[in-house]
Image (cartoon, coloured by chain):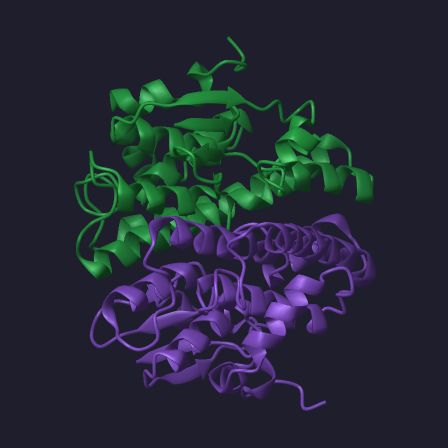
Chain colours: A purple, B green
Amino acid sequence: MKMYGNWRSAAAFRVRIALKLKGLAYEETFIDLDAGDQHKPEFRAINPQGAVPALFDGDGPPLTQSLAILDYLEETKGGVRLLPEDPRARARARSLAQVVACDTHPLYVPRVRTYLMEAYGLPKERMMEFVRHSFETGLKTLETRLADEPGTGRFCQGDAISHADLCLVSLWVGTKIFAVPTEPYPTVARIAEAILALPEVQAAHPLRQPGAPTS
Amino acid sequence: MKMYGNWRSAAAFRVRIALKLKGLAYEETFIDLDAGDQHKPEFRAINPQGAVPALFDGDGPPLTQSLAILDYLEETKGGVRLLPEDPRARARARSLAQVVACDTHPLYVPRVRTYLMEAYGLPKERMMEFVRHSFETGLKTLETRLADEPGTGRFCQGDAISHADLCLVSLWVGTKIFAVPTEPYPTVARIAEAILALPEVQAAHPLRQPGAPTS
């Protein structure tokens, strides 16, 4: 398979973890989001949205949107299962995943950060207040649900890793990149550490990809 | 089933359409988002995120996040199918759905609108520029993909209604509520009209729910 991603992209990180956990071989081409390469015609031809990741599986058209790609991999490939069998457990794993992938991550992508600075003339530090507010809102929801709901186990949904964990860890790594305090979220932290202990997740880690800062 | 929703909520609209297309009986309790009822302890006990919809199916815990609910209904209930069988077609339907449900709708929910006005002191009209920008970015992606990709048919994915259409129409109805110009999106408009022609969608329409403005 061939993937277009970026070291920092939370969405690319989720897909990279799934590919590694399922033992699927892939090559990743890094799109420089800071340089605006996602807006160039050659990438827009792959994904008109100008967003990573985009994944090619054989000769088919590009697959886009990280959660859609995760479901596609689950439905078509073997390896570690990343959704539980039980429909209610699946629904809970998906709901937790979407707290991150729908209601948190899209609020702090480059497009939104740039808009706030350019359209409203906000200096970077003031724009970052919105980024941190978005992280904190998502993390607070995850912490409350994971601490209170009986479905939580070693991972978000029971004791097996699922799409919820891929999303959770993609948010967690972002707290380091964007300097978001994490002390108020001990349950999220515990699960993030369990996910980060997996060698496949380490290999997929943003800071181990080409283009990432070395310190 | 018992659903907590709101007349204006795009996410509740998606779920309401699915319930009606599948012929599932439900009662809806309307949460007054403008009055902040989503933040009251009795609703936070149902969904700690303070977001609608939340759906109860029998004695189980509340189901949350509209796309997770749609997948749950698809996996557990009969009636009209809302995802294609073919994995690539499913992935495309889901990707289009997520352009709306992940990358567009979460940017203009009440929480974000309120934050921009209160934290940055933006008057409503200036805040609305961000809302319209978010709509336009999502609509432009949908228009390009739906006009150019061979998978498009009478509906977003072929000739059968899918999750992609439920999300598309939830965005389309929002263009009326938020006064977003729609002329640049003829393919989106064509599909939205086909969806809105279905009696189940009319019955689920935001403006036909309790609490909606009458003119």
| Horizontal side of residue B23 vs A195, given as left or right | left
Q: Position of residue A64 (x, y in %)?
A: 37, 63
| Horizontal side of residue A159 vs A128, given as left or right | left
Q: Would you identify the image quadrant in which residue A34 lies?
A: bottom right
| Any part of residue B175 in sight | no
Q: Position of residue B26 (x, y in %)?
A: 37, 23
Q: Residue at x 32, y 30 (%)?
A: B19
Image quadrant where one finds the N terminus of chain B = top left
Q: Would you identify the image quadrant in which residue B36 lies?
A: top right
Residue that lies at the very extreme toward the top in this rendered image: B214
Q: Position of residue A130 (x, y in %)?
A: 74, 53
Q: Would you identify the image quadrant in which residue A178 lies?
A: bottom right
In terms of depth relative to the viewer, which is nearer, B27 or B17? B27
In terms of depth relative to the viewer, which is nearer, A88 or A52? A88
| Horizontal side of residue B181 vs A8, given as left or right | left
Q: Residue at x 71, y 73 (%)?
A: A176
In terms of depth relative to the viewer, which is nearer, B74 or A19? B74
Position above or below: B120 against A52: above
Position above or below: B200 against B61: above
